Image (cartoon, rainbow, N blue to C red):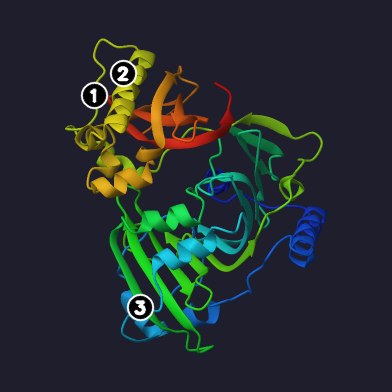
Amino acid sequence: MKNKKDILQIVRQMRVRASEKLDERIHREIENAVTSPGAATAFKEITLGQIFALFFKKPAAGYTLATTVVLAILAALTLIHPAPSWAMDQAIETLKKYKGLELSGTVTTDGKTYPVDLWMKSDATGGFIEAALANVGGQGMFWTKDNQSYSYDQDDKTVYVEPGMTLDLNPWPGPKMLALLLAEKNYKVIEGYDPSTGQKRVVVTCTSPGREQSLRLEFDVTTKLLVNMKTWQNPRQEGTPYLDFEKILYFDDLSDNTFDFQPPAGATFTNMPLRISDASLPALSDTNSGISTEGLTPDQACQTILQQYWDATLKYDFATFRRLTPRVAESSDEFLRKSFDLDGIVQLLKIGDIERTGTSKLGPLALVPSWIRCKDGTVSEVWTIIQFRESDQSCVIYDTHGYALNVKE
């Protein structure tokens, strides 16, 4: 069932549905957080579905974006000349105080649209997701626990497991992500009014080099908060958004109980298949990228390319970084510094063996962990997907794939 498995793959990005009791419990947790004195601060719900219904009726949420939607924005907003009343640094400062988010909207895959409710909690640094729970209506559940990610397919009663925190919304949609947007390709800001409310709005658009994605963010000028987020799985904002969050609630924090989910008795547990996006294959096929694997075993090839990758990271050797990771070959130095948090990594501790394998149209895939020391003294475990190319006996780095927090050295 290709559609269902695609949705479960997405469940690294948005997983599936919950029971009524779970929904009731989660909303009860959130209501308690909102109403308890000093515990959590929720931002007023703002929905722009009516305004943008002519252009985007479905989902979006992720990483970055292009500029082909500018005409649509012009139709939806009464534009004024950009004024100094709003700046990204103001939004960054405002979002620092929130550790919990609830995002509601839709996800569209294979021409079908599903409702999505997503709860997330950031780590202490405010840079990464520490816990997440996603309910994709009628399909299943996605949740994180003990540095692993789980997705429950209610049709086949199976829980798919993969190592690391793999919800594909990192970095945490807060200060770090907003700072990252400033280095994105085609970053643009348009300031105007929401014609339905008369409130001032700012629309930010940009394209994510190498990630085949585009992003559109809308901010409230008065509160400086993000109130709407859309993501496309192409760099041009073409077609229906993949994820569309039209309601975003903010909390000082969320209880750990919010993220608890127990699959029904009798559910089967199995490994999540290792796959990559076909849209990345042209970039990964560049014969000027990667390293030769001739005479090397798969483990040796992975060790070799990852050693070069981490050496380039620590030395800010952007030329080597781009050669090993061709999906970001057109990215600026500043984008690479921020996107891959190069300033936050101070030491490579160890490269592990191949933990999981898969395949793409180019050849085998391998998932390999590395342990790094961060600037704040903590140790992180990071998984990387290596793409082997059978056509010329070589391999390249596809991308990082999840991370583990608070790892013991």
Q: Position of residue 294 (x, y in %)?
A: 24, 14
Q: In the figure, 404 relative to 218: above or below?
A: above
Instruction: Give the residue drawn at x 32%, y 58%.
Output: 207
Question: In terms of sequence position, does the residue under pointer 1 or pointer 3 come before the other?
Answer: 3
**SS class, disc 3:** loop
Specify few, some or many for label 1: CA neighbours under 10 Å numbering under 14, 14-19, or 20 or more.
many
Q: In the figure, 156 relative to 248: above or below?
A: above
Say whether marks 1 and 2 touch (CB < 8 Å). yes
Instruction: Give the residue drawn at x 74%, y 50%.
Output: 255
Tell me if I can see residue 40 in this picture: yes
Residue pointed to by mark 3:
84
Q: Give the Cα separation between the discs numbered 3 and 2.
A: 49 Å
Q: Position of residue 247 (x, y in %)?
A: 59, 69
Q: Nearer the viewer, mark 3 or mark 2?
A: 3
Q: Give the Cα separation between the discs numbered 1 and 3.
A: 48 Å
Where residue 318 sits, quadrant-wise, is top left
Q: Position of residue 157 (x, y in %)?
A: 72, 39
Residue 304 is marked as 2
Q: Amino acid at mark 3?
A: Pro
Specify few, some or many for label 2: CA neighbours under 10 Å numbering under 14, 14-19, or 20 or more.
some
Seen from the viewer's position, the closer of residues 108 and 174 is 174
Q: Nearer the viewer, mark 1 or mark 2?
A: 2
Q: Amino acid at mark 2?
A: Thr
Quadrant housing the C terminus: top right
Q: Amino acid at mark 1?
A: Ile
Residue 291 is marked as 1
